[in-house]
Image (cartoon, rainbow, N blue to C red):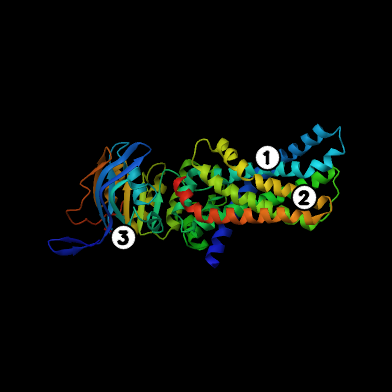
Amino acid sequence: MGRFQGGIPLQPLVAHLRSAVTVLGRYPALAGVDLDVAEGEVVLLTGPNGAGKTTLLRLLAGLAPLTGGHAEVLGHDLRQDRRAVRRHVAVLGHETFCYEDLTVRENLRFHARAAGGSVESADAAIERVGLIRSADTPHRLLSAGQRRRLALGVVATRPARLLLLDEPHAGLDAAGRVVLDDLIGAAGAEGVTVVMASHELERARPLATREVAMAGGYAASGVLDHEPRPARSRTTGALV
Amino acid sequence: MRRFAGSVLLVAGKDLRIEGRSRVTTNQVLPFAGLVLLLFAFALDPDRGLLPRVAPGLFWVAVLLAALLAVSRAFAVEAENGARDGLRLSVLDPAAVYLGKAAGVAAQLVALEAVLAAGLFVLYDVDAHQVWLLALSAGLATAGLAAAGSVYGALAAGLRVRETLLPLLLLPVVAPVMLGATRAWEAALNGVPSDAWPWVQVMAAFAVMYTALGVIAFGPLLEES
């Protein structure tokens, strides 16, 4: 999935969607999305509620079905092999993917091992998202903000090539937002591609290298026609 | 192979840990199964001679009803907080997830059966004969219940009507296990183990068949649920 501009090869494409359709029940949540995402980009999806942002993220994660059109993510055709994509993505969704009766530590260790990682990576994630004091607290006793941090911890345990973040700033306090921005910044610095959907544009825009507007299940300006610009750290302002 | 076994243990360990915390089996399923045995004992009490004869059948009915709750619970935890998506995003082989969930259910049922069996011998005035045969047939019946239950539990998991659908799907299917376990226990308690062998074979075949089906079908079921 190499990409050329004026005959010059650019970054390989991590995602390449053409007329991608996803029907949920009888409702076409994605009505024909064209989207390119180049390696290392931080793409911000914007648009009103119901525009299809969450479904697009789930499609890119291999969680939502591709009903029509073409979609290739990380070199895998989503129509042929959705499972292959999932090994290489980390998803921050509206839910934590965690079990109510397990503690923060147990949940993260389970997810780390289930992702092929180590127990140590889970313990590091606990520290990274600032949940050390709540490490032995069951999920059901966590506050909304702590749950959001735990979901961030699940993302941090996965060795991902593509981060998919759905309203990542929602429910986080100021310190949690700094943790999130650092995680996104670090991902960009490591060449990990990020696609995020957000309504908090003043917070998300400085992190993004490109913005794609969505409405009614379509993406405007999803196809690349220019070089992605480098992102700036929300906290330091430095290029990452 | 080692990684596959590790994945099975990871899922089974997770489910058993959740059960250990929530105590649904000990606080709800076990009392429910015990009540079933107790109520039948009261209902049949006028005919004390009947109790030992119907004991195997009532025991396995109680285990079956408890198995429905255990299977339902094992898949309900995956519906919380999008945990099923977490499993789908993992690198775990779906076959290993299936075997892990079935192993978790089986472990709970074995513990439950041990307690219920003790109650059976006290309440129903049953003398224990051929304990090895009782244990063997219980093991095979448990494996069959857990294997079939995990297939139909996954099938019903994504549906709104899963609580009512699971019994409708599972109860007719596990009829051979109920019949086999009851007949095998009757043969054991009557001291004629040779009568049990055809039923032991039926239960073994059932367990193998449903385990194979689950290993093959669980991936697509996880996708669709």
Residue A185 is drawn in which quadrant? bottom left
Query: Within the image, what quadrant is residue B103 found in?
Result: bottom right
From the image, which quarter does the C terminus of chain A lie in? bottom left
Q: Residue at x 75, y 43 (%)?
A: B57
Residue B66 x/y as whole percent: 67, 42
Using the image, tell me which numbered label, if any, was put on residue B28.
1
Amino acid under disc 3:
Gly
In the rendered image, residues at marks 3 and 1 fall on the same chain: no
In which image quadrant can residue A186 be found?
bottom left
Q: Position of residue B117 (x, y in %)?
A: 78, 47
- Amino acid of disc 1: Gln
Could you say which disc has been placed on residue A236 in the image? none
- The reply to whether discs 1 and 2 touch (Cβ–Cβ < 8 Å) is no
Residue at label 2? B185
Q: Secondary structure at mark 3?
A: loop
SS under mark 1: helix
Q: Amino acid at mark 2?
A: Trp
Residue B23 located left or right of residue B58: left
| Mark 2 → mark 3, Cα distance in angstroms | 57 Å
Left or right, A106 with respect to A6, comes to right
The residue indicated by pointer 3 is A75
Answer yes or no: are tags 1 and 2 on the same subunit: yes
Q: Residues within 10 Å of mark 3 (few under 14, many from 20)?
A: some
